Amino acid sequence: CGGSIRLKTAPGEGSVFTITLPVKREVSATSSSKEAE
């Protein structure tokens, strides 16, 4: 689905996890009018 998980580790320093997820933004007229109220 387009995401990724990365792991970087070093002895004595710990680990870093990086998770990337795709975000799909959809703007509809209905949701925009509700936010304006």
Image: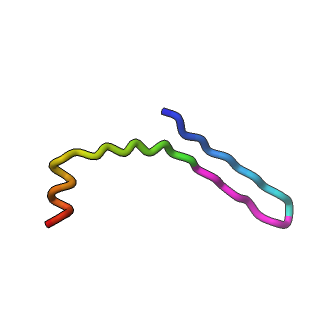
Q: Is residue 6 left or right of residue 35?
A: right
Nearer to the camera, 34 or 8: 34
Nearer to the camera, 17 or 32: 32
Nearer to the camera, 31 or 2: 31
Q: Is residue 26 left or right of residue 17?
A: left
State the residue at coordinates (18%, 47%): 29
Q: Is residue 25 above or below residue 9?
A: above
Nearer to the camera, 37 or 3: 37
- Magenta stretch holds residue 37: no
Q: Is residue 30 above or below residue 2?
A: below
User: What secondary structure predominates along the stretch shown in magenta?
Assistant: strand
State the residue at coordinates (22%, 45%): 28
Which corner quadrant holds the C terminus?
Answer: bottom left
- Magenta stretch holds residue 18: yes
Name of the residue lying farthest toward the right:
11
Please identify the quarter of the rendering in which residue 17 is found. bottom right
Name of the residue lying farthest toward the top:
1
The image position of residue 31, as x and y in percent, is: 20, 52
Q: How many numbered marks have been drawn onto this rendered protein structure? A: 0
Highlighted range, magenta = 12-19
Colouring method of the image: rainbow
State the residue at coordinates (82%, 66%): 13
State the residue at coordinates (18%, 64%): 36
Q: Is residue 24 above or below residue 32?
A: above
Q: Is residue 31 left or right of residue 26?
A: left
